[in-house]
Amino acid sequence: MQDPHGHASPVVGVSRTTAGPADDGEAAPVGGTAEGRDHRDDGEAARAHGTADGTDPRGDGTAVTAAVTPARSDFTLVVLSPTDPMSRGQLRRMAQLARDDGFTVRWQEARGGRGSLARTLRELAPLLRSAERIIVGDPFSRYVQLLLTLFAPKHLTVVDDGTATMEYAAQLARGERLVRWHRRGGSRGPRELVLAPVTAAARRKLAPNARRTVEIFTSLPVEPPPGTTVTQNTFAWTRSRFGPPRITKGADLVGTSLVETGVVDADQYALAVAELARTHGATRYFAHRRESTEKLHRIAVETGLEIVRPDLPLELIARRGPIGRTVVSFPSTVVHTLPLALVGTGVKVAVCEIAPEWLKENASPRAQGFLAGVTGTAAHEVDRLTAQATQPSQRLEFG
């Protein structure tokens, strides 16, 4: 699952049982990514498609297959391991949760240096060729794009990789090339030019046609391309597996890697975090796994916040508790997913808008619009916080 600012490491799942047209989508191969999701991806999709009893795994009334949902033994989850230690740690924990639920998990060191790409393709080829469905989590991943180009499935499901899912669906619907929102879309470097044929081929493979069905399994508002099925992820598995949590009196802040991806100015971000903590009485700061140690140290020193590095996606951490009565986040996947994961608990979720003056001069021209879209499409029960500088101290007030 991917947030608006990270990139994950692909996870590929494969099922050798054909999912019928009424199937709710994840009956088979899963190819998701762990590098793009900020605090999330709770494995909801794998459970939805892996149920052996033919029941609705989410309880939301969507068309779930009764006749052809495969057993867990027909489903293999392949993790194309990243190199980042924090990402690897979260993936290890999530892989164990999948094993505990009866799924087969295969850990693939896909980025292990020279020869790792060829070795990975060779080892996965039999599995992918036999798969009726492949489920991918990061359509922007070059690894995923290459796999789709070489092993085109009959049925394809794209599961949430954070807010990048929104951008993927919109770009595909408009017929545009797939470019992450925070990257400048002008001239392409040598690497992009070399990979351009792969990206173009993958874009075609990600679109439905007479021989291929495409589904998007998401909790986010998306603009799907014509012919694409959208299945709602309601986080029913997360709620049934964890919690309800113990609610604390204070507030928790959710961090972002917008500084690390070159979108937001570091000083502006530190000021915003300090003022949000003061305004809401926050005591903890849940760090995005891509946030730098230096930035987190500065936040701890300047604000007194306890820095928490979650070892699981934030939706699971929140359900397990304890969690603050108010959770404040910058524009991120969690402003869409936490209200679903925490429904009925009394926890209030708020999103702080990114002011235009916080953006760096070299930020992508699309950044402000995309981040505003993430905020604007959040659930109606999510509070919107707008930052305003006050003179002469330049302190921020949120209203």
Image: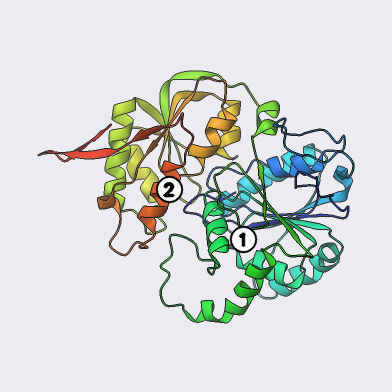
Name the residue located 35 percent from the left edge and 54 percent from the top edge. Answer: 368
Q: Nearer the viewer, residue 297 or 369?
A: 369
Q: Nearer the viewer, residue 372 or 183?
A: 372
For the question of whether residue 111 can be seen, the reply is no
Horizontal and vertical percent position of residue 27: 80, 47
Question: Label 2: which residue?
Answer: 373
- What is the quadrant of residue 398 in the picture? top left
On the picture, is 130 further left or further right than 208?
A: right
Q: Nearer the viewer, residue 93 or 250?
A: 250
The CA span between labels 2 and 1 is: 20 Å
Horizontal and vertical percent position of residue 349: 45, 30
Q: Which amino acid type corresponds to the residue marked 1 in the rendered image?
A: Pro
Name the residue located 60 percent from the left edge and 72 percent from the top edge. Answer: 199
Question: Which secondary structure lies at badge 2?
Answer: helix
Q: Nearer the viewer, residue 210 or 218?
A: 210
Q: Which amino acid type corresponds to the residue marked 2 in the rendered image?
A: Gly
Question: Which secondary structure lies at badge 1?
Answer: loop
Horizontal and vertical percent position of residue 165: 56, 53
> Taking 311 as reference, is 76 above or below it?
below
On the picture, is 334 further left or further right than 152?
A: left
- What is the quadrant of residue 177 in the picture? bottom right
Q: Residues within 10 Å of mark 1 (few under 14, many from 20)?
A: many
Which one is earlier in the sequence, the residue at label 2 or at label 1? 1
**Disc number lying in front (2 or 1):** 2
Colour mode? rainbow
Give the position of the C terminus as an image quadrant: top left
Question: Label 1: which residue?
Answer: 139
For the question of whether residue 134 can be seen, the reply is yes
- What is the quadrant of residue 153 in the picture? bottom right
